[in-house]
Image: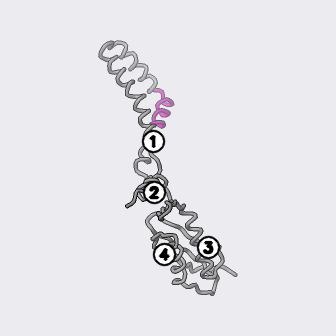
Amino acid sequence: MSEHDRLYRRLLRRETHASRTAPAVAAATLGAVFAPVVIIVGVLALLVPSLFESVVAIVRDAASNPGVAAAVGGALLVVGAVFVLLAILPGRRTRHTLITDRAGVVIESSGLAESIATTVATACRLDRDQVRVSVHRRRLVTVTVRPVSGVSVDRAGIEAATRSTTVTLGLQLQPRVVILREGTLA
């Protein structure tokens, strides 16, 4: 592996994965705000118990108000849900990468799908509106064709056109062809 390959792989990984910097900064900021508050309240409880009891009474009075309790609970629920979703959901973007001798290239899945759809429509002599393509993350390309009513469509030709496009681009994507039973009118 050359030095350029390692550089390209690192740069392409940055382009295909979402950054987790903003959630990490938000979590650190929340920790930096709430940790001193907890420490100050703990020290206050040890040193001046009467002042601590008055603070607890104020918080208890505010919590007894249903509007305040609902607002605080809702805010905590939203913040918690955002952090849980950021932890669970994948950080990958819908992009594919190519590394050639001279460059590393990032291809958006939507652009790749358009290219495959145009190639399939041209190769199989279909109208471009009859072909719909979706590129999945798991190295799968789904080509959906809605033929003209009464006209048969060559499944092998569709697969060959899809493979030729992906091989030309240097991608190893498995095509899945779906030919709809309901046709269109010419």
Residue designated by label 4: 176
Indicate the secondary structure of the residue bearing disc 4.
strand
Mark 2 → mark 3, Cα distance in angstroms: 29 Å
Residue designated by label 3: 118
For the residue pair 10 and 59, the one nearer the viewer reads as: 10
The answer to whether the residues at label 3 and label 4 have Cβ atoms under 8 Å apart is no
Residue designated by label 2: 8
Q: Alpha-carbon neighbours of circle 3 within 10 Å: few (<14), some, or many (≥20)?
A: many
Q: Amino acid at mark 1?
A: Pro
**In the image: residue 36, left or right of residue 124:** left
For the residue pair 54 and 61, the one nearer the viewer reads as: 54
Indicate the secondary structure of the residue bearing disc 2.
helix
Q: Alpha-carbon neighbours of circle 1 within 10 Å: few (<14), some, or many (≥20)?
A: some
Which-is-in-front pick, marks 1 and 3? Answer: 3
Q: Amino acid at mark 4?
A: Arg
Give the residue drawn at x 52%, y 70%: 169
Which-is-in-front pick, marks 1 and 2? Answer: 2
Mark 1 → mark 3, Cα distance in angstroms: 39 Å
Q: Amino acid at mark 3?
A: Thr
Give the residue drawn at x 51%, y 67%: 135
Q: Quadrant of the N terminus?
A: bottom left
The image quarter in which residue 149 lies: bottom right
Compared with residue 179, is residue 139 higher up or lower down, i.e. above or below? Answer: above
Which-is-in-front pick, marks 3 and 4? Answer: 3
Span highlighted in magenta in the image: 64-82
Mark 3 → mark 4, Cα distance in angstroms: 16 Å
Residue designated by label 1: 23
Mark 1 → mark 2, Cα distance in angstroms: 26 Å
Indicate the secondary structure of the residue bearing disc 1.
helix
